[in-house]
Image: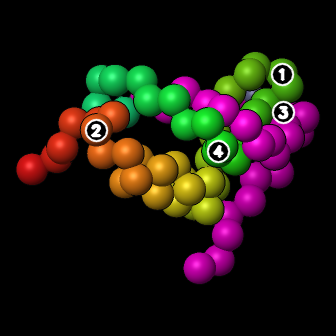
Amino acid sequence: MEELEFDECPACESKKIRHKRGGITHGRGGREVRIPRATYWECDACREQFYTMADMRRIEEYLDKYPGRRKVAA
Ligand SMILES: [Zn+2]
């Protein structure tokens, strides 16, 4: 799959964005799930966090590995 990359913040259009690796808290289904080893982009200007497809896939894999941490969708 082709990886989508960002060159500006989708929230404020700042170019001061960085790809980071670390723990994030991801809101999902009305709950917050802690992902200890995620990759994500963060905007230095507004602190918005956003994800590429690859980042999202890592988050999904983590959630699949720890199903007890989320509601099971029907
Ligand atoms: Zn921003």
Q: Which marked residue is nearer to the observer: mark 4 or mark 2? A: 2
Is residue 3 part of the magenta span, yes or no?
A: yes
Comparing 23 with 68, the one in front is 68
Q: Residue at x 84, y 38 (%)?
A: 17
Q: Which residue is mark 1?
A: 45
Look at 73% across and 37% down and name the residue there.
22
* 62 relative to 9 in the view: left or right: left
Task: Note whether 47 is above or below 10 in the view shown.
Answer: above
Query: Image height check: is 7 above or below 47?
Result: below
Marked residue nearer the N-terminal end (3 or 2): 3
- Of mark 4 and mark 3, the one earlier in the sequence is 3
- Any mark on residue 68, and which? 2
Q: Does ligand 1 reach within 8 Å of label 4's beta carbon?
A: no
Which mark identifies residue 4? none
Residue at mark 4? 38
Three-letter code, disc 2: Gly
Q: How is the image coloured?
A: rainbow
Indicate yes or no: mark 1 CB to ligand 1 under 8 Å: yes
Q: Quadrant of the N terminus?
A: bottom right
Q: Which residue is denoted by mark 3 in the rendering?
A: 14
Give the foreground label among 3 and 2.
2
Marker count (numbered) = 4
Residue stretch in magenta: 1-27
Type of amino acid at the residue the image marks with label 3? Ser
Q: Which is more N-terminal, label 4 or label 1?
A: 4
Q: Amino acid at mark 1?
A: Ala
Task: Say if mark 1 contacts mark 3, CB within 8 Å.
Answer: yes
Neighbours of disc 2 within 10 Å: few (<14), some (14-19), many (20+): few
- Determine if the C-beta at disc 3 is less than 8 A from ligand 1: yes
